[in-house]
Amino acid sequence: RRANLAALRDLPAVTKDGVPIELMINAGLREDVAALDLTGARGIGLFRTEFQFLVSATLPSRDRQQRLYRDVLDAAGDRPVIFRTVDIGGDKALPYMNVEGSAQEENPAMGWRALRLALEREGLLKVQARALMEAAAGRTLNVMFPMVSEPWEYEAARSLFVGQRAWLASHNKKLPVAIRYGAMLEVPGLLETLDLMLPHLDFLSVGTNDLTQFLFAADRAHPRLAERYDWLSPIVMRYLARVVRTVSGSKVALGVCGEMGGRPLEAMALLGVGIERLSITPAGVGPVKAMIRSLDLGALRADMAAILAQPTADPRGQYAEWAQRHQV
Ligand code: PEP
Ligand code: MG
């Protein structure tokens, strides 16, 4: 099995009936980039930039940020890297930063974090924007904003980047050849106005870790609630099917970067509802690719409407049974 997974590394992630699936990895530290070669993944679909902030004793300077981003881009070479702007605050509080009130939050996951914090601490986001653009000079920069709840937040963040690009240009700095902007869909309510955002987006990445805890109103880290938190439930799957319908027909590239995509059965269900890009933990790449290569996606999609219409009390069993019957 181990030898098979090693051999899989160089084989394409294509379903049995010929649909190419984009398999990328999640990363956050310099060292993680080695996993690109080890797994044969197509790129980094989520680079969690807050890791550098969390492991630092002081606020990382623009120079230090830039060096990290450049090292990551150098190591990735031709493979794309999607940098997510800092998702700090809430439970990822930084001791050296005065984020007043955050330690006392009753619901830190729903608190003053991620883009909410970054839009108010503009200096922080400006420094990061410049660090990213200078690191990606001469290349394409892919940047994504976390915890977007409403289109105006995305617009404000993108405008800030556009402003910083203009500032760098006016100072004769070398710029990225292109900047692609994306948002994370982690707050369920964003779907209600997602159509308004689509014309201004290059890509959308569903963060199913946060999304699921908000869909179920169940803390993702609470052990007693783990049973209630099923990624294969019709609540999650019907929601994702709606996201796919909303995005389809637009030019926006849609993917999933939550942990569920790293599990073969969950990944299969994601493909079934129409997701064709996954960014997952490196350890999941082999098993998920093996699933993809044995999957008749046409057959699954033909059955998917029936599965979503008639969920059983055990959705996991339902998908497992389908997979077994179709020799996935
Ligand atoms: C997510 O919420 O699904 C996600 C990918 O972001 P994080 O796990 O870093 O919150
Ligand atoms: Mg998240």
Image: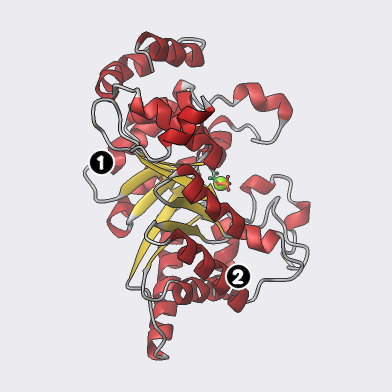
The residue identified by callout 1 is 248
**Quarter occupied by residue 300:** top left
The dot on residue 156 is: none
Is 188 situated above or below 310? below
Against 97, residue 110 (above or below) is above
Residue under label 2, please give it: 121
Q: Nearer the viewer, residue 299 or 292?
A: 292
Q: In the visual, does 190 lie left or right of 49?
A: left
The residue closer to the viewer here, 27 or 5, is 5
Q: Residues within 10 Å of mark 1 (few under 14, many from 20)?
A: few
Q: Position of residue 182 (x, y in %)?
A: 40, 56
Residue at position x 71%, y 32% in the image: 222
Q: Secondary structure at mark 1?
A: loop
> Seen in the image, is 25 located left or right of residue 162?
right
The residue type indicated by label 2 comes to Arg
Q: Residue at x 60, y 33 (%)?
A: 217
On screen, 18 above or below 197?
A: above
Could you tell which of marks 1 and 2 lies nearer the N-terminus? 2
Residue 281 seen anywhere in this rendered image of the structure:
no
Q: Toward which corner of the image does residue 318 lie, by quadrant?
A: top left
Q: Position of residue 247 (x, y in %)?
A: 29, 43
